[in-house]
Amino acid sequence: MRTLSLFRRAQSASANLAILAAFVMAGCGGTAPSTPAPQTTGQLPPAATAITIPTLPAPSSATPSLILATPPPVPAGASTAACQKPAALTPAVTEGPYFKANSPERTSLLEADMSGAPLTLTGYVFTADCQPVANALLDFWQANAQGQYDNAGYTLRGHQYTDAAGRYHLDTLVPGLYPGRTEHIHVKVQAPNGPLLTTQLFFPGSTENQSDQFYDPALLIHVQSSGSQMQATFDFVVSAP
Ligand code: FE
């Protein structure tokens, strides 16, 4: 993928080496260490390529709301017809060591002065019989464009709930690589009163996919456009009571 390859070239080798010690043993997909994950300062490294984010919504209350006050717009081309019965349940993938509970509720993980390639990810949460799931929880977390997690704060972490039509909308960045892992976004998905699915999403065209032990082509996002603003979709299929 052109965006990924361009972005990957923008990453400095020195930055990767600097974080190697922190990540090589833990390897986000690997077994969680018995000691706390490496702490960061919460400050993102200097921007390699600054992006401009014109409007940043203020994080909402820390108290989750089950219903979005203003449902996001319907993504272009999105349709419940994309679900084919019986739909296969979205595969689970290991949580890794960097999940943090109590992420803020927000649909945008973007903050001022972040560097990286913007990504808008949209889609539905369905049941296996293709019924959209309203008020399903989605809790996303990911590395920044330099391949680093914020384990001290909640940068690039946030949860949200599907709207009445079962849709979600996430504004974020394409995550960076870190040792042993291809680009990926972690997510937990749960229908109301249903079992919790923990999985990861992957990016088509990444040369690191095939060497990542956790890569699953069933978890590839579907890229609609990959210019300066990557637009992609992914529909989750989960068990529901
Ligand atoms: Fe990870």
Image: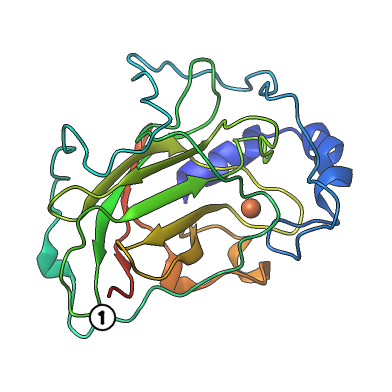
Of 227 and 87, which appears nearest the observer? 87
Amino acid bearing label 1: Ala
Residue 53 percent location from the top left of the image: 39, 18
Which residue, given by chain and number where applicable, does mark 1 sit on?
Answer: 87
Q: Secondary structure at mark 1?
A: loop
User: Mark 1 vs ligand 1: CB under 8 Å?
Assistant: no
In the picture, which quadrant includes the C terminus?
Answer: bottom left
Residue 32 percent location from the top left of the image: 76, 60
Residue drawn at point x = 44 percent, y = 49 percent:
139
Q: Mark 1: few, some, or many residues within 10 Å (few <14, many ≥20)?
A: some
Residue 160 percent location from the top left of the image: 35, 43
> 98 above or below 108?
below
124 to the left or right of 31: left
Residue drawn at point x = 33 percent, y = 71 percent:
238
Tell which residue pokes out farthest to the right in this image.
21
Residue drawn at point x = 70 percent, y = 31 percent:
152
> 193 above or below 51?
below
220 to the left or right of 57: right
Quadrant for residue 105, please give it: top left
Quadrant for residue 72, please give it: top left
Residue 212 percent location from the top left of the image: 66, 67
> 7 above or below 182?
above
Q: How is the image coloured?
A: rainbow
Of 44 and 139, which appears nearest the observer? 139
Of 145 and 228, which appears nearest the observer? 145
Number of numbered discs on residues: 1
76 to the left or right of 41: left
Quadrant for residue 6, please give it: top right
